[in-house]
Amino acid sequence: MAANEVVGEGTVHILVRAMVVASFIALAAPAFAQNSYPDPYRLVDHWAQLPSGRTFGKVIGVQVDPDGKSIWAFDRCGAGACDGSLLAPIMKFDAAGKLVNNFGAGLFVQPHGFTIDRDGHLWTSDADAKNGIGNQVIEFDLSGKELRRLGKAGVTGDTHDTFDKPTAVAIAPDGSIFVADGHGKNDRIVKFDQDGHYLLEWGKKGKGPGEFDTPHAMAFDAEGRLFVADRGNSRLQIFDQNGKFLAEWRQFGRPSGIFITRDDVMYVTDSESNEKTNPGFIRGIWVGSAKDGSRKYFIPAITQVSIPPNCPEPGTGAEGVAADAAGNVFGGETACGRTLRKYAKE
């Protein structure tokens, strides 16, 4: 291939996978062995269709609509953050990738946590504070109507009603609300009842059971166990709903995002692993079981055709992740990629 020949994203996907395989076999066979799992997924080029003139920013969150087909994305307003932007960060795409709804303009500084509860309500967290907004959890209905807020707008703290850069929110089957207060100094999980009243909290900075180093994402399994992506410690931690430590799993790399289906298929994104930060793993999306921690598939991260000059490392991979009813996987990328990708189940 000539040096100036243009290739499509799908071709790059194949080439980069080959390069990743070759480099890891050459440098560290045991390291690559961690990620040598089947990949029965096909990248769908340019699936998500944005209006003319808009591009994706950091797509931090991805969720599946209650219809099982439509996809919601939480984007940082076409940039690295939303403060000062007039763009709507919450976007809904139909099964064909067409943008059909968007809202939330002017409400966020740093979009981060993103989930849909069993009532079909969207929950978001804002992991920064500026100009009197941020550091809150906001609940919406699917039309974009604001329903509730937790935390004090623009206020940083560690009390029962303040947060310091909350990273994630998860809703238990009984409606209890769990907030990961993870990108600031708190490194804790805070539990509220279904009406938003404070109940309890656990966690502090550390490496032991029930301690955290950037609790970055959360999800519940079918049994009601809470899975926390303890990213800085390169592990998943599992708790009951009162904060009792149950287990830790390190076989899913350095987790940034987690999504668990109702039948306990688990999707975990690793957007940071390399030989320095988490030796033995490469970046990508794991597909496995929340029941027993087994791993079934691995989708390697891909490198973009054009790498921004300030990109710290190519192929940074997805942070947000979700899977539709057909098993297609959707990854939201925040660093060099800055896009929403669809991987179709073959």
Image (cartoon, rainbow, N blue to C red):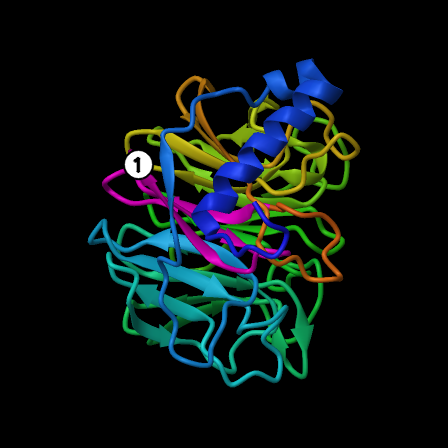
Among the 4 quarters of the image, the one containing residue 275: top right
User: Does the rendering let one see residue 262?
Assistant: yes
Point out residue 195 in the picture as x, y percentages from the top left corner.
39, 60
Q: Is residue 205 magenta?
A: no
Point out residue 49 in the picture as x, y percentages from the top left corner.
35, 67
Quarter of the N terminus within the rendering: top right
Q: Is residue 321 magenta?
A: yes
Among the 4 quarters of the image, the one containing residue 272: top right
Q: Nearer the viewer, residue 181 or 31?
A: 31
Of all residues, the one furthest to the front in this rendering is 2
Which residue shows up at 46% across the image and 81% down it? 53
Which residue shows up at 57% across the image and 62% down it? 58
Range of magenta residues: 317-346
Point out residue 217 in the picture as x, y percentages from the top left corner.
54, 45
Q: Which residue is mark 1?
A: 345
Query: For this view, does 150 lie left or right of residue 230?
Result: left
Query: For this view, does 213 lie left or right of residue 12?
Result: right
Mark 1 belongs to which amino acid? Lys
